[in-house]
Image (cartoon, grey):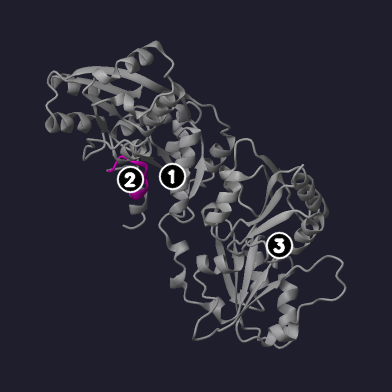
Amino acid sequence: MDKGFVYLVGAGPGRADLITVRGAEVLKIADCIIYDKLANPALLKFARADAEIIHVPKRTSGASVTQEEINRLLLEKASAGQTVVRLKGGDPCIFGRCAEELAVLIEAGIGFEIVPGITAGIAVAAYAGIMLTDREYSSQVVFVTGHEAQGKRDSSIDWHLLAKFSGTIVFYMAMGNLNSIAERLMENGMGADTPTAVIADATFPTQRVVKAALDDISEKCKQQGIEPPAIVVIGAAAGSNTRLNWFMKKPLFGKNIVVTRDAVGNVDFAAKIISRCGNPLKFAAIKIKPLTETNEFLRTLAKITEYDWIIFTSGNGVTIFFEALQGLGKDARVFGSAKIAAIGSRTAAKLSEFGIRADFVPSVFTGKELGIQLISYANLRGKKVLLLRSQLASNELVEILDKGGAEVQDVAVYTAIEQKSECVWLIEKISNSRIDWLTFASPSAVNGFFEQIRSDLINSAKVKVASIGPVTSERLKTLGLSIDLTATDHTLDGLLDAIEQTYKV
């Protein structure tokens, strides 16, 4: 049997979207992924469905996997002919024990590639607005481990040199020894007033920064409950202008935002929130159920070329329709000469993923405006129009198109059913004022959510309620909910724009 191959991949500093392009590419081809506790589990979205996933956390307490066990796993999987990704937090060659794993692979004659990652020290500084180098105060940087190997008899850290170092010192894995590190530096001549910064949970919406003088930093961190993982920066750089801290000044930074779509939709929405520096909390209130195996759908598909216009009113409808086409061995050619309309930009973008350019998108993304504007745009009198949408959609669009003289066929391609989710944690967070926003992107999500969470709890709590559009808001009102905002642009981005705006007033 041919031997496999091992990729040692840097997962980056925390946020999943900070992995390198190369790192994401090799995750997609791996037969086996072995990842440590500092590698964001969200990166596993790149893994093949059949890939073996093995978690190998290293902890100072609790369940832990030794380096020897990890080495054995690498050998076992690669010797079996597998393509293995060893996913390590930050950069594999910076305090990542990369050399030890490579030595084992080399001895066994197993090929490997090192895929660099953004190391925590550099990323942390960037996300905290700390300039590690600056022509005014620092022309050199040194990376130091704050946690040397267990059983090591003599420290290889030159404390005298560090204490005199005229640049920026970055300590990794230093929280457990922060007080002794400060004492060793001061004992060797570093000023007690030297600026020091500790950054915890860097690149995440929970990021925290503590700044103090060297002799006070340990106590300040204790007072503020700072725990690992954290990076310590010592030197003039640590006292940099707080205006440079762009990340923590974002409107949604640190805001806890509950998303209530289906599981797949929540992933999409959560990614948008993370990109705006917010903290998404996923609570699936609904489940999308395709209806493309019904006789009605199959009969409609058989005569789809007879229609003049085909209308999609959601991205879900587009995805489910094309999945059904693929399952039947068909593609977009089934549309023939029919024109395509989409309710909004997001639905149009989803169509473009399947090679379809929407012929019409209204300027206001509601079913009502779609009907009104399409009638003005095209003469629909006597035209055959097919709606491919949710079974739960209102009849308003059909009525408007009917009045415009169209012959309308309304076919459900999916429905949303209530999804039961574990809700104790969410009720606790809402009760303790630890949720900033509840977001709702459809009336069905409203229904599914309030089947599990009492409306009076929401009205009595400090949490705010945000709706994607008037139809969803109307459903919230019928349940007695107070609505803090309804998005003007009825898209997920429009909803987040509206929430951001509340912090800019």
Q: Quadrant of residue 176?
A: bottom right
Task: Characterize the local packing of mark 1: few (<14), some (14-19) or many (20 or more) Cα atoms within 10 angstroms.
Answer: many
List x then y, in percent, for residue 502: 34, 52
Query: How far across and how far down the image is residue 475, in percent?
Result: 34, 28
- Identify which residue is drawn at 34% across, 18% down: 301
Whether 150 is drawn above or below 281: the answer is below
What's the magenta region? 489-497
Q: CA distance from mark 3 to mark 1?
A: 38 Å
- Residue 459 visible in the displayed image: yes
Relative side of 410 to 117, left or right: left
What numbered label is drawn on residue 96? 3
Q: Main secondary structure of the magenta part?
A: helix
Amino acid on which disc 2 is placed: Gly
x and y percentages locating residue 88 in the rendered image: 67, 56
**Figure check: 341 above or below 86:** above
Q: Which residue is mark 2?
A: 494
The residue singled out by tag 1 in the image is: 437
Query: In whole angstroms, how far apart are the C-alphas of marks 3 and 2?
Result: 42 Å
SS label for mark 3: loop
Mark 3 is on which residue type? Gly
Residue extending furthest front? 1
Circle 3 or circle 2, nearest the eye: 3
Q: Which three-letter amino acid code belongs to the residue tagged 1?
A: Trp
| Residue shown at the point (58%, 54%) measured from the top left | 23
